[in-house]
Amino acid sequence: MAKKAKRYKKNTHKIIFIIVAIILCIGIFIVVNYFRGKSIENKNEVEPQPENAVVQESNLTTNEEQAEENITQVGGYAVIGKIKVPKIGLEDVILEKTTDDSLNLGLTKFWGPEMNEIGNFSITGHNYKIDRSELFSKLDNLIVGDTFSLEDQKGRTVTYKVYKKYTVDPKDTTPIDQNKDGKREVTLITCTKGAKKRIIIKAREV
C-alpha cells in the first residue's frame, strides 16, 4: 500500500507539473501574440499630418504660380510680355514672333514696335484652344469699350480700351498700318470660324 501511495503521489506531481508547464506555455503564447499585435497596429497607424501641412500645400501652389508668371520662353520662343483680358478670362504670355510653329504654341507678336511703345503693336493667335492656353478662342466676345492690359519685360503695364471691331479679308494688311498720332495702340487679330475672314480688335491706351 505504501508503494502504491508513493507511486500515486509521484504521478500526481508529474500531472501537476505538466499542467503548470502547459499553463505557462499558453500564457507565454498569449503575451507574445499580444505584443506582436500591438506592434502591427503601430506600424499600420497613419502618421498624423503636421500642423503646417496646409501651409506647405499653399506654398507649393504659390511656387507653381510664380513659375508660370516668370516663364521666359515657350518652345524655344522668347516671351516678350503678357496680356490680360478680364472679360474673356484670358491671361497669357506673348511670344516674340509669328511663325507657323509659334502660332501653335501661343499668342505672338505679328507686327509693330516694341510692346507698350508709341505705335501700333499687333498680336495674333489662333481661334481655338490648346493644352496650355485658350489663345484667342473667345476674342470675338469683346466689344467696343472693353479693356485689356499688356505687361512688358520692362515691368510696365498699360491698359488699352477697344474702340473698333470689324472683319477683313486675310490679305488685307491695313489693320497693322502704323499710326502717326503719337499714341500707343494695340491690334488683336484672329480668324473667324472657317478662317475665311480675320477678326480685328483695335484698342488705344486709356
Image (cartoon, helix red, strand yellow):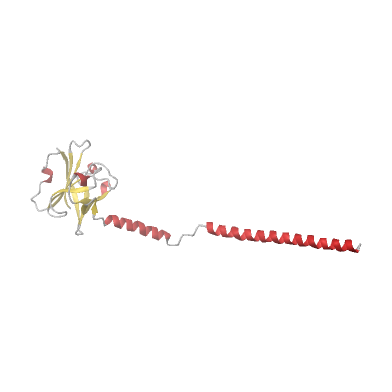
| Residue 146 drawn at (x, y percent) | 22, 47
Of residue 104 and residue 162, the one placed in the foreground of this image is: 104
Q: For this view, does 51 lie left or right of residue 144? A: right
Q: With respect to residue 186, does 30 lie above or below?
A: below
Tell me what residue is drawn at x 39 percent, y 58 percent: 57
Q: Where is residue 4, by image quadrant?
A: bottom right
| Residue 202 drawn at (x, y percent) | 16, 46
Tell me what residue is drawn at x 12 percent, y 46 percent: 176
Tell me what residue is drawn at x 19 percent, y 49 percent: 161
Q: For this view, does 176 lie left or right of residue 72? A: left
Q: How many dots with numbers? A: 0
Q: With respect to residue 201, does 64 lie above or below?
A: below
| Residue 80 drawn at (x, y percent) | 20, 54
Quadrant into which the N terminus falls? bottom right
Q: With respect to residue 91, does 28 lie above or below?
A: below
Q: Where is residue 35, by image quadrant?
A: bottom right
